[in-house]
Amino acid sequence: MSPSRRTVLLAALAAGLPVAACTSTPTPELAELVLATGPDGAVFREVGAALAAALTDQLPHTRVIARPSAASVENLRLMKEGTAQLGLSSLDSVADLDSLDGIRAVGRLYDSFLHLVVPERSPIRTFADLAGRKVSLGPTESGTEFTGTRLMKLLGVVADDVRMAHSESAVQLEAGTIDAFLALTGIPTPAISGLVTKGFPIRLVSLKEQALALASAFAGPYVPVTIPATTYGDLGANDTVAVPNLLLASTSLSDDVVEIVTRTVFTDSARIAAGHPEASRINIRTGIATGGVPLHPGAERWFRSVKR
């Protein structure tokens, strides 16, 4: 008996072989495709740019644009407005939408980890110590802002919170103009790695109890995890919370386009995740676990095709 198409595909993926020819989907005619990504210093920005480059190869007649943004919440708004046709978002931000009208999932990609970063000599030792301190919650309309604000409200912590990109947060932390910053992002995240590389002494504050509180209060998107000890030099392991990230597509996109997008994500994942170990977990086995967000018909068609 000859092996199934799915078996052949999985074997090719494991061996790092190209598998683009595993579909007969014709190249659609689409003038422009906008992918909403993330802010400076965040993994969303880098993974989104790499995905846009991969899609440019697969859609030669289409101008593929990686649009910088504040991340999750802004990306969802841009998609609702029709300004972007693809967008990256953390699952908790999507799950909080009043309606998923116009938005469907391409697939689950990788997890983001919530970081609480402070100077090494900071008196901040717990999340509760943020009370009254000047803390960056990431950019306005970011996933960091969404999850950080939700956590502060849940635990009754009132900080002097400000909004800025992760890269700017790192600059301001080093300058001493903020006391701490939160970053919900893939690992390693460039803004934090940059501080470590420069030799500025920092710590990651444990969020073990906060992870359990979020998972208990909001079933589904939150998972208690540990950032591996090897992630940021000598900072060591850190207990925190992870949130799955989804690639989303507008229902206005044709099934053919989204099938090509889905195929590209899951067969060119090594290129897309280059330099980001957590993003390297992008795979077809977990790709359909979209947390209740329905798959776009084009994505569903591709996943079904590789199961044959």
Image: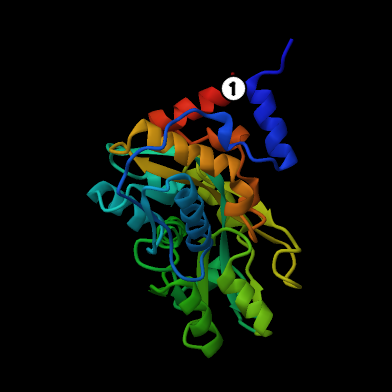
Q: Position of residue 99 (x, y in %)?
A: 28, 38
Query: Which residue is drawn at the image coordinates 62% and 60% (left, top)?
Result: 187
Q: Position of residue 203 (x, y in %)?
A: 66, 74
Residue placed under numbered mark 1 in the picture: 307
Query: Which residue is drawn at the image coordinates 74% and 10% (left, top)?
Result: 1
Q: For mark 1, give the secondary structure.
A: loop
> Could you say which quadrant of the image residue 69 lies in?
bottom left
- Answer with left or right where residue 253 lies relative to residue 232: left
Q: Position of residue 198 (x, y in %)?
A: 65, 84
Establish if 66 lies above or below 41. Answer: above
Establish if 23 lies above or below 63. Answer: above
Q: Position of residue 13 (x, y in %)?
A: 68, 38
> The disc labelled 1 sits on which kind of residue?
Lys
Which residue sits furthest left? 81
Establish if 92 lies above or below 146. Answer: above
Query: Which residue is drawn at the image coordinates 58% and 70% (left, top)?
Result: 190
Which residue sits furthest bottom? 175
